Image (tube, helix red, strand yellow):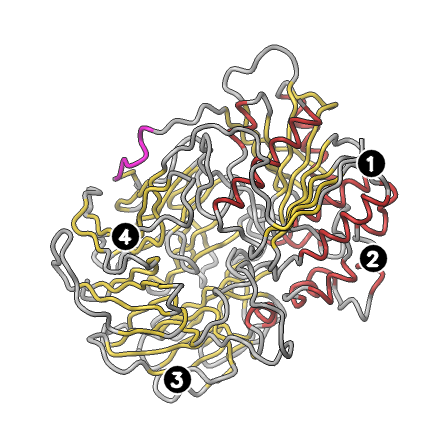
């Protein structure tokens, strides 16, 4: 049967969904220097609101009890609470409709629900990454004056009108006195700052930065020193790898995480050090079977967060002695501030706090004296997830590979359909996140529990190119997209079928971004799947190179530009093998996706339509690479479920 449809935002076609679950959301955790308080952005999210839930800033004590909460702007979304060395706190409030961001100050000892004064600063645009100077006398942050879009390439792009490329948002370091006063732009104009930290003497910053288009140029960023008063910029290092998380020790050693990263934000790699005066960075964790994700100096040693196989970990690293010791690990996902260490640390490094979740437990704050981290909140303790979870390991092509298998706790007799979900990236990993029984929480749509409740198994593999097994594993798909990684995924299915009652004749495949490309690609390479959903995919790497807003990311993975080596791009393009495609496919994309333009999904739909392969394409108005409108999330989730039910159930 031929099923063809193009829609620009469509509602009302989703199947009936289960009742939504209200989840208490924690984000943007900060830990006071003394380790006695946390600050978070919190909200109650039923998963079906007309916009992201309006939250508040909540300060909690060591036992998790609420000490104070703040909500000075009912039209705002809060972010980036930060403590000064003296324990005072500031946070950001963004009023998107008004196009402004405010910095609020909370004095020490502010009482429960206490009113707070006027903002210390108001920015005409967006801001993030608030950091106090070492002496607490100044506040620095990243600001984009007159921003045309939200920060990051995953956000919806600015309209492609007028002279293309003539205007770029500029994210710059801005500084103001901690008590309030004039906001001063420090870093030079024309330079986009991605991440930064103060030097211990408070006289400068270390930062990752590039000229021009901030969305596109992170992959060629340099490590620089920026004078806090003069704004003078000096290059420390410019290695041919991606860098993030620059941190400076008391003796002037810069540590950063470097490696092969496909997206700005999902940080992962080895730990490198280089003198603040400049030089060649040195890898101090060569060959580690881990992906490092966060850093904090403690004297001459580092506390680093890492993903080690299927576990989040906090690791003590001694760069001089080249020794490593795991202080804490668990099969969970941990988060604190965006673009910061996934585990927040006290000033002396002895206490830690983070937001933790896994497949069967929704997020809670955990904290304690290292190495003991224990839950101190119970906001989501009553929630349950009726799901079985297995960490699956297998070997293929000389690699040890891991993935997650989710399924019903009491499966009915006989074999069951299964959907394999390939993560984005590819430099990323599938890690444990709470399986809600309905709704759209955060900026994604929950599909695991609705599928499991229908009798499906769900498989999340971490093939070569993923994080968690070391940098050599992450780099193993360079110039090999669709070969080794697809075989890893298929070998993972073989491993799953040995331990679970999965019906090989009823397999489905889904992915978004890199996973969306893999879904399109697999349709041309194997007929093992009976139904496919491809979100924000890439049909043609050659045309994609000239259409997307982040083409710089491709050269580290393909080895050259499409203009210098078109053959390697053509060899990984689903459109090159499209006549092999047979599997019914639902395709969706965001209208203003900078990373994977909707034109790629349109090209793929057009080809399947011409070949009379059952296909549906939905393009969602105003959405970027990450969807934000709950109505759109509900619609795509409903179509996802209906598609697999149609062909696999």
Image height check: is 332 above or below 425? Answer: above
Coordinates of residue 430 in the picture (x, y in percent):
55, 42
**In this rendering, position of residue 180 left or right of residue 411:** left
Query: Mark 3 against mark 1, which lies toward the viewer?
Result: 1
Query: In the rendered structure, which disc, 1 or 4, sits on the residue that comes first in sequence?
Result: 4
* Residue marked by disc 3: 227
Earlier in the chain: of badge 2 and badge 4, it is 4
- Which region is colored magenta? 377-382
Upstream in the sequence, badge 3 or badge 1?
3
Closer to the N terminus: mark 3 or mark 2? 3
The residue sitting at 64% across, 46% down in the picture is 535
Is tag 1's residue or tag 2's residue first in the polypeptide sequence?
2
Q: Nearer the viewer's eye, disc 2 or disc 4?
A: 4
Residue plotted at (62% across, 21% down): 499
Crowding at dot 1, Cα within 10 Å, few <14 / some 14-19 / many 20+, comes out as: some
Q: Position of residue 191 (x, y in %)?
A: 51, 80
Considering depth in this image, is 606 or 82 the residue closer to the camera?
A: 606
Q: Position of residue 82 (x, y in %)?
A: 28, 62
Q: Residues under labels 1 and 2: Cα distance?
A: 20 Å
Pick the front one: 180 or 594: 594
What residue is pinned by disc 2? 570
Crowd class of label 4 (few under 14; some 14 to 19; many from 20; radius 10 Å): many
Determine crowd level at label 2: few under 14, some 14-19, many 20+ residues with C-alpha closer than 10 A: some
**501 left or right of 347?**
right
Query: In whole angstroms, how far apart are the C-alphas of marks 3 and 1?
Result: 59 Å
The quarter of the picture where the N terminus appears is top right
Secondary structure type for disc 4: strand
Which mark is on residue 582? 1
């Amino acid at each position: 049967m031929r099923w063809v449809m193009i829609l620009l935002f469509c509602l009302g076609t989703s199947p009936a969904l289960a009742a939504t679950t209200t989840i208490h959301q924690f984000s943007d955790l900060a830990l006071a220097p003394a380790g006695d308080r946390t600050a978070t952005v919190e909200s109650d999210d039923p998963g079906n609101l007309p916009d992201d839930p309006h939250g508040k800033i909540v300060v909690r004590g060591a036992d998790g009890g609420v000490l104070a909460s703040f909500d000075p702007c009912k039209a705002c979304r809060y972010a980036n609470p930060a403590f000064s060395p003296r324990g005072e706190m500031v946070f950001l409030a963004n009023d998107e409709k008004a196009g402004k961001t405010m910095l609020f100050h909370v004095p020490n000892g502010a009482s429960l629900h206490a009113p707070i004064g006027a903002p210390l600063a108001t920015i005409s645009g967006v801001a993030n990454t608030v950091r106090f100077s070492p002496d607490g006398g100044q506040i620095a942050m990243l600001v984009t004056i007159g921003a045309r879009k939200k920060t990051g390439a995953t956000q919806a792009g600015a309209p492609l009108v007028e002279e293309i490329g003539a205007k770029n948002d500029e994210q710059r370091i801005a500084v103001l006195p901690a008590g309030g006063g004039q906001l001063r732009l420090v870093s030079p104009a024309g330079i986009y700052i991605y991440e930064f930290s103060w030097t211990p003497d408070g006289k400068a910053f270390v930062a990752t930065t590039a000229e021009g288009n901030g969305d596109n140029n992170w992959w060629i960023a340099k490590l620089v020193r920026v004078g806090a008063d003069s704004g003078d910029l000096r290059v420390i290092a410019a290695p041919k790898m991606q860098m993030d998380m620059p941190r400076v020790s008391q003796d002037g050693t810069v540590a950063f995480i470097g490696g092969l990263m496909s997206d700005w934000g999902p940080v992962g790699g080895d730990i490198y050090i280089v003198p603040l005066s400049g030089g060649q960075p040195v890898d101090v964790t060569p060959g580690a079977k881990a992906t490092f994700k966060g850093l904090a100096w403690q004297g001459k040693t580092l506390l680093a967060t890492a993903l080690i196989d299927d576990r989040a970990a906090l690791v003590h690293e001694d760069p001089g002695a080249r020794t490593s010791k795991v202080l804490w690990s668990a099969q969970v996902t941990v988060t604190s501030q965006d673009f910061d260490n996934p585990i927040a640390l006290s000033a002396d490094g002895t206490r830690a706090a983070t937001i933790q979740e896994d497949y069967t437990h929704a997020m809670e704050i955990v904290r304690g004296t290292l190495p003991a981290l224990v839950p101190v909140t119970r906001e989501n303790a009553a929630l349950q997830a009726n799901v079985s979870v297995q960490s699956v390991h297998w070997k293929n092509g000389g690699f040890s590979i891991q993935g997650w298998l989710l399924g019903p706790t009491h499966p009915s007799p006989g074999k069951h359909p299964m959907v394999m979900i390939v993560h984005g990236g590819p430099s990323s990993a599938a890690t444990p996140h709470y399986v809600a029984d309905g709704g759209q929480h955060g900026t994604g749509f929950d599909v695991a529990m609705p599928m499991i409740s229908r009798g499906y198994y769900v498989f999340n593999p971490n093939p070569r190119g993923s994080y968690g097994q070391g940098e050599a594993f992450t780099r193993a798909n360079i110039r090999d997209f669709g070969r080794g990684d697809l075989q890893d995924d298929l070998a993972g299915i073989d491993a799953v079928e040995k331990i679970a009652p999965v019906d090989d004749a009823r397999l489905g495949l889904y992915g978004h971004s890199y996973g969306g490309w893999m879904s399109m690609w697999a349709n041309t390479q194997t007929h093992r799947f009976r139904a496919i959903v491809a979100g924000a995919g890439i049909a043609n790497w050659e045309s994609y190179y000239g259409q997307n807003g982040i083409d710089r990311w491709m050269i580290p993975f393909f080895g050259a530009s499409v203009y210098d080596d078109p053959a390697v791009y053509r060899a990984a393009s689903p459109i090159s093998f499209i006549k092999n495609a047979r599997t019914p496919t639902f395709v969706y994309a965001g209208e203003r996706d900078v990373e994977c333009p909707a034109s790629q999904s349109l090209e793929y739909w057009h080809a399947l339509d011409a070949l009379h392969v059952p296909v549906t394409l939905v393009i969602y108005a105003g959405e970027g690479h990450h969807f934000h409108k709950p109505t759109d999330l509900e619609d795509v989730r409903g179509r996802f479920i209906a598609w697999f039910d149609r062909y696999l159930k």
